[in-house]
Amino acid sequence: QVQFVESGGGSVQAGGSLRLSCEVSGYNYQLYCVGWFRQAPGKEREEVATIDNYDRTQYARNLQGRFIISQDKAKKTAYPKTLYLQMNDLKAEDSATYYCAAGPSFACGGTPGNMDYWGTGTLVTISS
């Protein structure tokens, strides 16, 4: 059973930083894509950043430079273990629920629909 434990969300002022974490268990594939997505009220879910088993990263065009995705892998198996998202210079429009997700390696850089498993989300609120 695939499970995610997301943490790190909260409320900060514009210009501040947050670091999200997502502990992954049960996703036992060596070829994979894991990533962060977000959804603001009344808007569609959108990709924030993804990273694959080769540590190749992709970012939403308007977020690159402010957000950094990284991961820890299990030492023996190289399965995904923990996913991180460092968010800097936060803006009011970054307010959303942030979800971590996992899927096949081709899912990186694609639509949210390509991901197979989803966390329950962590809320990020930026005040201006």
Image (cartoon, helix red, strand yellow):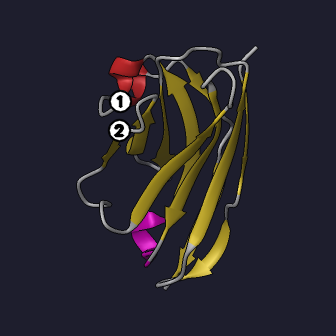
Callout 1: helix, strand or loop? loop
Dot 1, how many residues are within 10 Å of its Cα: few (below 14), some (14-19), or many (20+)?
A: many
Q: Where residue 33 sits: x, y (%)?
A: 45, 27
Look at the numbered discs 2 and 1 and tell me whether their residues touch, using CB distance below 8 Å: yes
The local secondary structure at tag 2 comes to loop
Circle nearer the N terminus (2, 1): 2
Along the horizontal axis of the image, is 107 left or right of 9? left
Query: Can residue 74 be found in the magenta stretch?
Result: no
Residue 45 in sight in this render: no
Tell me the residue that label 1 is attached to.
108
Q: Residues within 10 Å of mark 2 (few under 14, many from 20)?
A: few
For marks 2 and 1, give the CA distance: 9 Å
Q: Is residue 4 left or right of residue 103?
A: right
Seen as rendered, the residue at the extreme front is: 76
Amino acid on which disc 1 is placed: Cys
**Residue bearing mark 2:** 56
Q: Is residue 17 visible?
A: yes
Residue 89 appears in which quarter of the rendering? bottom left
